[in-house]
Image: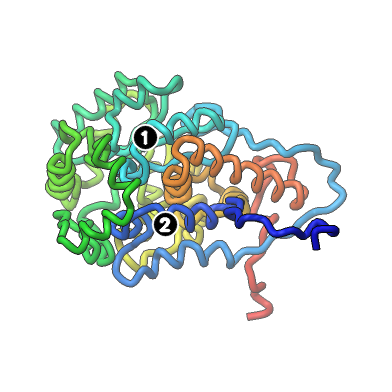
Amino acid sequence: MHAFGFGLHPRRPSPLLNVDDYQRAARRRLPAMVREYIDGGADDLATLAANRAAFARWEFRPRILTGNQTPDLATTVAGIDLDLPVLLAPVGLSGLAHWRGDVAAARAAERQGTRHILSTASSWTIEEVAAATAKGHFFQLYPHSGETAATLMKRAWNAGNRMMMVTADYPVRGNREGERRTGMGPPPVLTPFQALRLCRHRSWTYQALRHGRIPARNLVEGTGVSAAVRSVQIQERHLSQSTLNWDDLAWLRDSWQGRFYLKGVLTPEDAEKATTLGLDGIVVSNHGGRQLDFSPATLDVLPDIVAAAGNTEILLDGGIRRGTDVVKALALGARAVLIGRPYIYGLTVAGEEGVTQILEIFKTEIERTLTLLGAPSIHALTPTHLRPHPPPSAR
């Protein structure tokens, strides 16, 4: 065997080639309660599954002999030039995945020519992320009490954020039973059994205790476990928005000097209202399947929302795992997409470098897809590049 180069070698870890590879690697590194927080969803997980299934309902119609060179992936979102039509979605408590959390994500986004959207419930403060990065990123607001919202908006603006994204699909927390079973429900509960399971992940436990980047640092001071519990309690008391209405949104719009996006739109009717208010952008989102179960998949409702929104910029999140998913969303009218779980997997595995690699995977897959599709740029994509799968005649 040695003569033919088939000698025995120590087993080497498999290369991480795609998002699913990173997900498997991340799950091995995290305790059950954190895995469930990242990967779980509401009730029966129907919307969580629907987001992925929607992309399989479209197939490509490639053109041949187009003579295109390397396709152009550049675009603009909120008036800012991007090299990649993929932004990093707001993810609360990202320090649970890796202690560098939001700082690592924002720095990786810069390296790949895109932007990170900082969550209200981030593990690093607005000011800390701004100090660690070179470019103004974006800020996501849960519009709780007017005074708190005004303070957060002022802090975000002073830190250089020029786009704000208001999340409006959180009138009450979704029923995430998996989180509750593993101790991540409100309030967090750490039983002796769960503590034992944490100890099995010694590296994660050590980093969590040493660096203390678990709480939502924009909401509480301190870095310990007690601060983490307080921050979750504050989120439950103040981030739910059951009384929020369109007049409140108009007040927020008038109070913000920069570009203003609304996240959580799933119907043409709400898209029309957002357009009437003069909002700059809409994010088609069902909160990653974590809020109202049996909400529609975001890709399924995208065409109707694009038709209703006029010239308003449309972004989309939910279920994106491949460059082919991104291309399908852009062909159906999205300006760009947001990814959440995929970059958290990269963050878990290798911090800033892991997030950078996830974005590089998306870039490579989008370029390859466009080349095989015969499209010279993302701006050349139209619904004619797709057809339903299976086609209507086969149903």
The local secondary structure at tag 2 comes to: helix
Graded by Cα atoms within 10 Å as few (under 14), some (14 to 19) or many (20 or more), the crowding at tag 1 reads many
Residue 241 vertical position relative to residue 220 in the rendered view, above or below: below
Residue 100 disc label: 1
- Residue 233 vs residue 328: left or right? left
Query: Where is residue 297, by image quadrant?
Result: bottom left
Task: Give me the residue at 21% from left, 53% from top.
Answer: 171
Return the x and y of residue 224 as percentages of the image width and height: 17, 38
Q: Quadrant of the C terminus?
A: bottom right
Image marks 2 and 1: residues in contact by CB distance under 8 Å: no
The local secondary structure at tag 1 comes to: loop
Q: Nearer the viewer, residue 203 or 107?
A: 203
- Residue 182 vs residue 73: left or right? left
Residue 69 vertical position relative to residue 45 in the rendered view, above or below: above
Return the x and y of residue 300 as percentages of the image width and height: 50, 62
Return the x and y of residue 20 as percentages of the image width and height: 53, 57
Residue 27 disc label: 2
